[in-house]
Structures are given as structure tokens and as C-alpha cells.
Image (tube, rainbow, N blue to C red):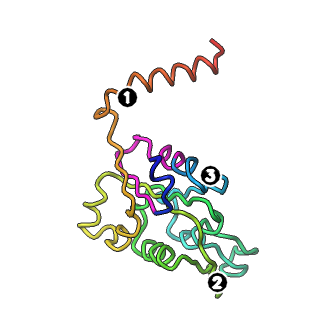
Amino acid sequence: ARRYARVDATVLITGETGVGKDALARAIHASGPRRRDPFVTVDCAGLPSSLIESEFFGHERGAFTDATTARAGRFEMAGHGTLYLDGVTALGGTAQAAILRAVEERQVVRLGGMAPTPVHARIIESAPSDVTTLVATGAFRTDLYHRLSVLPLYIPPLRERAAEIPVLATRFVAEVSQSLQR
């Protein structure tokens, strides 16, 4: 992860639920040259399909009924920092195509807009361990998978890293002790 922090490329973090993909994404950002810039998270599974384009790319005033003001999307909000796509495989086909275009062209167009906006953010994504199965079955685009997995990083579950349990337990006990002042 420390090596990946220094390389300015897209990182795909895979692993089971609860292995710490979010924490690792934050650690990569915090250890890299973009650490002073924003770390913007998108919960891909929690986005309603009707809001995906507006959330990712922003919108102009009047683009839809409730768009009373212009709003930057997550790609713009990340600026020169990091855009973290949590659970990227939850996105549908249309959203996957839009993300692929933004990643390839390094620019986005706000919903209802005409002018492209350059994208400078580093992209880190998380996906379940079976992402290659999703690609093989067509549930996740092959071309997007290859664009996002420039630097793949798999986190094994804790049951496969038993040697780390005492280290983690010691740290958690220290944190709790400090918070309780004991």
C-alpha cells in the first residue's frame, strides 16, 4: 500500500466485506502526494440510479426540475485529490459506461451542460473478491475493469492473517484504554 501511494495510478482494492478496504483506501491517500487534497467517497451501492449522473458529474441550473443551482459532481469535488468509489461493481451498465468515459477522457460534462471539465483526481475503487467472476459473466464491464485495476490490491480476510490478531488486539485495547483514561 505504501508503494501504491507513491504511484499516481488507479487502484482496485478487493476483498471480502469487513476486511478494511475503506481504511486501506484512506491510508493510500494519506500516504501519497495528494494527501493535502480532498478524499471524496462515493458509496456506489447506495446511489439511486436516477441520481448517478448528477452525483458523479454534477449538474447545471435547470438540468432537471429540482436543479435550482449548479452543483459540482464528485469528480470535480475531488479536485487534485482522490475519488474513492466504494463498491464500484454495484453500478449498472449505463453508469459503468459513463465512469469509463470519464476515466479514459479525464474529463466530465455536467448534466445539462455543454462544456467539459477536466478531471485531475486519482481514482481508488473497492470491489468484492469475486470481481473477476462479475467480469466473466458480463455483470461488470471488462474494459472498465481493466481501466480500474491498473494497481490491484487484494486484502485477505483476518482468518487468513492470524498472526495479525495480537497486533490488532493490542492496538484496539490501547485505543479503548486511552478513551476511557484507564
Where is residue 149? Give x, y as percent: 37, 62
Question: Could you tell which of marks 2 and 1 lies nearer the N-terminus?
Answer: 2
Question: Could you tell which of marks 1 and 3 lies nearer the N-terminus?
Answer: 3
Mark 1: which amino acid? Glu
Left or right: 111 in relation to 66: left
Mark 3: which amino acid? Arg
Where is residue 57? Give x, y as percent: 59, 73
Spatial CA span between label 2 and label 1: 50 Å
Magenta stretch: residue 14 in it? yes
Question: For the C terminus, which image quadrant?
Answer: top right
User: In the rendered image, which residue does mark 2 sit on?
Assistant: 112
Among all residues in the image, which is located at the extreme right?
69
Mark 2: which amino acid? Gly
Q: Which residues are magenta?
A: 10-27
Q: Secondary structure at mark 2?
A: loop
Report the number of discs: 3
Spatial CA span between label 1 and label 3: 27 Å
In front here: 118 or 60?
118
Magenta stretch: residue 118 in it? no
Left or right: 177 in relation to 157: right
Query: In which quarter of the view is residue 71 placed?
Result: bottom right
User: In the rendered image, which residue does mark 1 sit on?
Assistant: 164
Q: Secondary structure at mark 1?
A: helix
Marks 3 and 1: in contact by CB < 8 Å? no
Q: Nearer the viewer, mark 2 or mark 1?
A: 1
User: In the rendered image, which residue does mark 3 sit on?
Assistant: 35
In front here: 9 or 112?
9
Where is residue 154? Give x, y as percent: 34, 49
Mark 3 surroundings within 10 Å by alpha-carbon count, few (fewer than 14), some (14 through 19), many (20 or more): some
Spatial CA span between label 3 and label 2: 32 Å
